[in-house]
Image (tube, grey):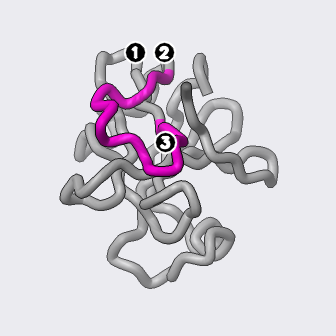
Amino acid sequence: MEGTTITAVRKMNDDECERMYWPTESHRTPRVLELSDGSVAFPSTDPEGNAPGFFSGLPDTAENVEGNTIRGLSPITDANEVNRNRRTPPEIHLSSGVIVTPLADPEGNGYGALYLFDDGQLYEITVS
């Protein structure tokens, strides 16, 4: 992910929701980050992918994010809030200085997980 550019920010489409076994008619359809390498990053409520998550720090207008390069990934800074299963979701650091974090829900009731669709494969993105 590091070094890729965000080419678009959009709502997850029906095919992507179905791949995650999430309802396509949901008010919780997450936004996804389309990346310059063709992959798509999106949040989940948890590492098991039980439901859609939410990106904190993602500005309301895509224009503020599109064209930014992902400078790096780092562990979430509040070590007390790391997922119980010890898989730490990353904060995504953008070239604009914005930090995007996957959350479990829009109210910030815990950190979520970060997933990536890349060339037909699904990956959970974690950091140490």
Badge 3 amino acid: Ala
Circle 1 crowding by C-alpha within 10 Å: few under 14, some 14–19, many from 20: some
Which circle's residue, 2 or 1, is located before the other in the chain?
2
Does residue 30 appear left or right of residue 47 in this picture? Answer: left
Task: Tell me the amino acid under the disc marked 2.
Answer: Arg
Q: Quadrant of the N terminus?
A: top right
Q: Nearer the viewer, residue 38 or 114?
A: 114
Dot 2 and dot 1 residues touching (CB under 8 Å) = yes
Provide residue 12's location: percent of width, then percent of height.
51, 62
Q: Callout 2: 10 Å neighbours few (<14), some, many (20+)?
A: some
Q: Is residue 87 left or right of residue 61?
A: right
Nearer-N-terminus badge (2/3): 3
68 lies left or right of 120: left
Residue at image x 52%, y 70%? Answer: 50
Judged by depth in the image, the label closer to the viewer, 2 or 1, is 2
**Placement of 63 over or under 85, stated as above or below:** above
Residue marked by disc 2: 71
Q: Gap between marks 1 and 3, in whole Å?
A: 15 Å
Judging by the rendered image, the residue that carries numbered circle 3 is: 8
